[in-house]
Amino acid sequence: MKKLNFILILSCFFFVGKVFSQDHSEKIDALAEQLKFKSSISLELKKESVDVLDTIANILKTTSYTYNIESHSGMRGKSSDNLIKTQKRAIIIKKALVKRGINPSRLNTVGFGETSPKTSMPNTRGRSWNERIELIKKE
């Protein structure tokens, strides 16, 4: 009976740990979707993204994980320009999080340009889905 109780308790701790870690990842994913720049060519964040960065930083302060900041673009313009733009945008997000107290060694930046579209829809909605920032937890 003691062995069964121990296994049950251990299973509960494992399950609760999984739920909490997933919650942080899901929250960060949802918040990162709200990070937007002023236009498809801009390197300046929209005002509402500043509050989102505050919230993301507060969540990251409660963890010790390392994250990849991944920036993606749509297919407008030259591929080389889109790659450079996404690299710069990832660095902008990193600097903003470091300014909010996140250790820079926990944040890696990657600009993908237009190489990883979320959708192939050529309309405005498709472009907005492809122009995105993702924070990916490294295991």
Image: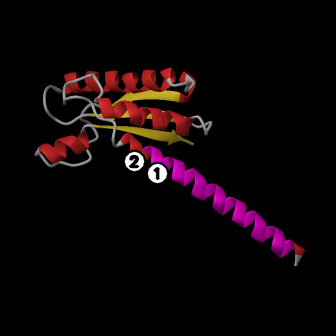
Quadrant the C terminus occupies:
top right
Q: How many marks?
A: 2
Can residue 5 be found in the magenta stretch? Answer: yes
Residues at marks 2 and 1, CA–CA distance in whole angstroms: 6 Å
Residue 73: give x, y in percent of width and height: 24, 34
Question: How many C-alpha atoms fall within 10 Å of the one at disc 2: few (<14), some, or many (≥20)?
Answer: some
Seen from the viewer's position, the closer of residues 62 and 117 is 62
Q: Residue at x 56, y 29 (%)?
A: 106
Report the amino acid beneath label 1. Answer: Glu
Eyeballing the image, is 11 above or below 93? Answer: below
View extreme (right): residue: 2
Q: Residue at x 58, y 51 (%)?
A: 21
Q: Is residue 117 left or right of residue 122?
A: right
In terms of secondary structure, what is the magenta stretch mainly? helix
- Per the image, label 1 sits on a secondary structure element best described as helix
Residue 127: image quadrant is: top left
Q: Identify the residue under disc 2.
A: 30
Q: Is residue 3 left or right of residue 20?
A: right
Report the amino acid beneath label 2. Answer: Ala
Q: Identify the residue under disc 1.
A: 26
Eyeballing the image, is 54 above or below 117? Answer: above
Residue 114: give x, y in percent of width and height: 24, 35
* Residue interval drawn in magenta: 3-28
Q: Are marks 2 and 1 in contact (CB under 8 Å)?
A: yes
Eyeballing the image, is 98 above or below 121? Answer: above
Q: Is residue 33 left or right of residue 20?
A: left
Quadrant the N terminus occupies:
bottom right
